[in-house]
C-alpha cells in the first residue's frame, strides 16, 4: 500500500461536470456533487520504505472529498 507524504502541490483541474468520463459511476457510487477531476504532485512512500515524487490524479466533490487516487507517473 502506498502512503501520501505531505501535501499535494501544483494542483490543477483537468475536467469538471459532464467533461468527466466516469461521471455516471461516480454519482452512482459516491452520490451527486460538483465533481472535478484533478491532478497534482506529491511525495509517496512505497511499501519498501522508499520515498518518491509522483504525479497523481483523483476525483473530488464538495462534501464528499477525494476519491479514486491514482499514480499516473513517477517524477
Image (cartoon, grey):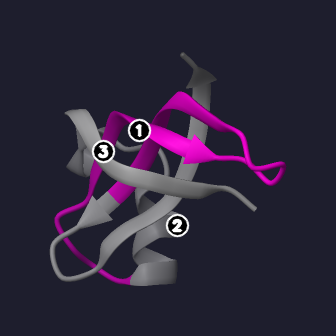
Q: CA distance from mark 1 to mark 2?
A: 26 Å
* Residue 21 among those drawn in magenta: no
Residue pointed to by mark 2 = 25
Considering the numbered disc 2 on the image, is that residue within a helix, a strand or a loop?
Answer: helix
Per the rendering, the mark at residue 58 is none
Q: Is label 1 in contact with label 2 (beta carbons under 8 Å)?
A: no
| Of callouts 3 and 2, the N-terminal one | 3
Considering the numbered disc 1 on the image, is that residue within a helix, a strand or a loop?
Answer: strand
Q: CA distance from mark 1 to mark 3?
A: 5 Å
Residue pointed to by mark 1 = 42
Rate crowding at label 2 as few (under 14), some (14 to 19) or many (20 or more) other CA atoms within 10 Å.
few
Name the spot of residue 33 as percent of width and height, x first: 21, 73
Residue pointed to by mark 3 = 8
Considering the numbered disc 3 on the image, is that residue within a helix, a strand or a loop?
Answer: strand
Rate crowding at label 1 as few (under 14), some (14 to 19) or many (20 or more) other CA atoms within 10 Å.
many
Q: Residue at x 43, y 50 (%)?
A: 58
Foreground pick, 23 / 1? 1
Give above or below for 73 relative to 66: above
For the question of whether residue 51 can be seen, the reply is yes
Name the spot of residue 54 as percent of width and height, x first: 52, 29
| Of callouts 1 and 3, the N-terminal one | 3
Name the spot of residue 71 as percent of width and height, x first: 60, 38
What range of the chain is rendered magenta?
31-59
Which residue is situated farthest in the front direction here?
Answer: 49
Q: Give the image quarter of residue 34.
A: bottom left
Amino acid at each position: 500500500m502506498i502512503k501520501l507524504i505531505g501535501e499535494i502541490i501544483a494542483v490543477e483541474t483537468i475536467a469538471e461536470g459532464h467533461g468527466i468520463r466516469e461521471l455516471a459511476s461516480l454519482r452512482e457510487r459516491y452520490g451527486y456533487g460538483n465533481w472535478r477531476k484533478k491532478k497534482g504532485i506529491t511525495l509517496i512512500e512505497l511499501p519498501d520504505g522508499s520515498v518518491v515524487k509522483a504525479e497523481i490524479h483523483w476525483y473530488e466533490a464538495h462534501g464528499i472529498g477525494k476519491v479514486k487516487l491514482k499514480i499516473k507517473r513517477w517524477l
